[in-house]
Image: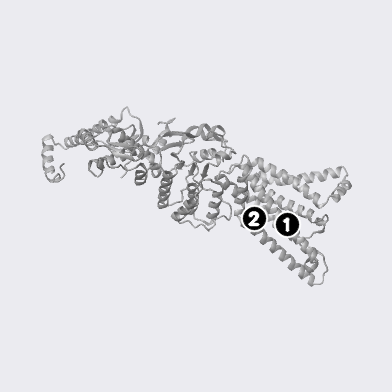
Amino acid sequence: MIEEGRPLFVQIAEDIENSIIDGSLAEDAQAPSTNELAAFYRINPATAAKGITMLTDKGVLYKRRGIGMFIAPGARDLLLGERRAAFATRYLDPLIAEARTLGLGPDDIARLLQERAATTMEGTSR
Amino acid sequence: MNRVINVVRMQLVNRQAYVWVPVIVLTGSLGLTLAIYSIIAGSGVQGPFYGGGAQAPLWCLLAVGVQALTLSFPFSQALSVTRKEFYLGTLLSAALTAMILAAIFVVGGLIERITDGWGLNGYFFYLPWVWEHGPAAAALVFFALAFGFFVLGFWAATVYKRWGTVVLTAALVIPGLMLVAALWFIGRANAWVQVGRWFASQTAPGWALWGLLATAVLAGISYLILRRLVP
Amino acid sequence: MTTVIEVKNLTKRYKETLAVDNVSFTIEKDAIYGLLGRNGAGKTTIMSILTAQNFATSGDVRIFGEDPYENPRVLGRMCFVREGQKYPDEATAMHAFRIAGLFYPNWDQAFADDLVADFQLPTKTRIKKLSRGQLSAVGVILGLASRAEITFFDEPYLGLDAVARQIFYDRLLEDYVEHPRTIILSSHLIDEVSNLLEHVIVIDKGRIVMDEETDAVRDRAATIVGDSAAVEAFVTGRQVIHRQSLGRVTSVTVLGRLTDADRAQLAAAGLDATPVSLQQLIVRTSQSTASKEGALL
């Protein structure tokens, strides 16, 4: 679950973001506490706290004084927007490069994409 | 002061070394000595009999003194006890043990006086020269011996830990050499008579006090070494 | 944050060897630190000096602002259980815990009892008769249950099998969350403990080669693998700490975070980037420092 070579707090934050995106953490729901995260991932609570802080700074979480951290309204949309913007760099560029190595052009990619999308994306469109 | 008392409790948690082994050794030695006396008495010899069996527990205390440094000191350091607290607490434990041993010896001596040597005219605790000046003086002698043996062991262990075998051997050999040198000087000055007279005039309690003085010196040296000793 | 330990220019010399070489660092309150390095790097020596069990040749050590030597006020707030710790002869684990309870104001016997059950430690057996693993368990329990404000663990979990070690890490974290205190863990099993550490201090040959927040170091390096020419092209201008070749394939470890742009460049060149774990980073840096002078990080 934990990858090498990347800051832990970033991975913790990403896991929480993933939960928000797939709907398991709804807006205005309570986020897991620092201690819960530390126990779950078996990491130092300070690291977990850093992840929470990062998300708070981003506007994904907010603090309710005396109670804890909660998912901000609009968090999901915020994250989706962010991921979409990075989509091209993170996924498309490597795809195009690999395709080029294999001698596949953009039209080939488009055709393959249509074929695959028809079978795999059924029932998962939002 | 509280922490010093706790060091005493720490040493006494190891009751086996401080209490049981010396008691067992003492009882065993006493039993053996009396057995030998009764055999000799049975064959018609009169007595009074004296034996050296009473020294056995002293060697126990020597060993306890050594271990107090080699094993208890490193543990006390892990628990963040200061060297001074450890030193005072350990000496206090030794003093308590020595006092109890002295009490046992005095009681034993009194019993022997009352029973005329266990009915065999054989004496283990009651050595006339030691008891010349009464039970209190005898107690002092026993205390000085017991405490002295402990400190000797402790001192030897500190020297060994700090400087190793060679220095320790030298430290033990040098007093012997000094004694030989002293004898030579006395011979040169032809002072045998004076020295002899001085020795004869010393009493057992007198020796006890000299012993305690020597013990204090060794104890002092131990502390100076302990202050810079790495566990 | 408050500083609880301050070390300045600490040096320890044994005849000709320099065990600790001009080391300086600070330890903040209530954080978990890793003191990492090879065997013989100087970790134990440093910890011994901090707890006044050993003496510095030169330099300054302040614990809670004071000199720890013969200082019961300061020493009473620290606990240092080392590898190969000696215990009183004939003492059992139960004796050891009872004695610890006398000296540590925060000693928690109930917690010690729980740990005894966790590690399946026979408390009535004499310590000198315990197995290596059980001996380590005694040390670990002493360190944990003491709840000392500053607790040093000098690889006392050597001898514990992997399951027992995981129990130790878990209990340590749990108790740290409930009762925050300053913990300094020395280890050469870096990857195992790295998740617990907020801060790492790496020692090599008596010198500090890294003193950073763990998370800052985690993506400090990457290994680029692929066609030799392409790899060399990519790594020009970057700091290389390790290089290995097999035929036309080269594997190079470079310092520096890989940005998204970097990753795109790598993908375009057909190169792979693999992450570098903390342990690999430290090992490679030490190897690299061995051939050059000075710290690279």
* Other-residue count near label 2 (Cα within 10 Å), few / some / many at <14 / 14–19 / ≥20: many
Quadrant of the drawing holding the N terminus of chain A: top left
Residue C278 appears at what percent x and percent y? 37, 39
Mark sitting on residue B103:
1
Identify residue type, mark 2.
Answer: Tyr
Picture quadrant of residue C202: top left
- Residue occupying the point 77% across, 50% down: B208
Work out whether mark 1 precedes mark 2 in sequence or the reverse, and give the earlier one.
2
Task: Give the residue pinned by disc 2.
Answer: B18
* Other-residue count near label 1 (Cα within 10 Å), few / some / many at <14 / 14–19 / ≥20: some
Residue C246 in view in this figure:
no
Residue placed furthest toward the top: C237
- Residue occupying the point 66% across, 42% down: B223
Quadrant of the drawing holding the C terminus of chain A: top left
**Which residue is nearer to you in this view: C90 or A41?**
A41
**Which residue is nearer to you in this view: B157 or C30?**
C30
**Which residue is nearer to you in this view: C250 or C203?**
C203
- Left or right: A107, with C224 as reference point: left
Picture quadrant of residue C90: bottom right
- Left or right: A27, with B227 as reference point: left
Mark sitting on residue C148:
none
**Element type at marker 2?**
helix
Identify residue type, mark 1.
Answer: Ala
- Left or right: B222, with C155 as reference point: right
Residue A6 appears at what percent x and percent y? 32, 38
The subunit carrying tag 1 is B
Residue B13 appears at what percent x and percent y? 59, 54
**Element type at marker 1?**
helix
Residue A25 in view in this figure:
yes
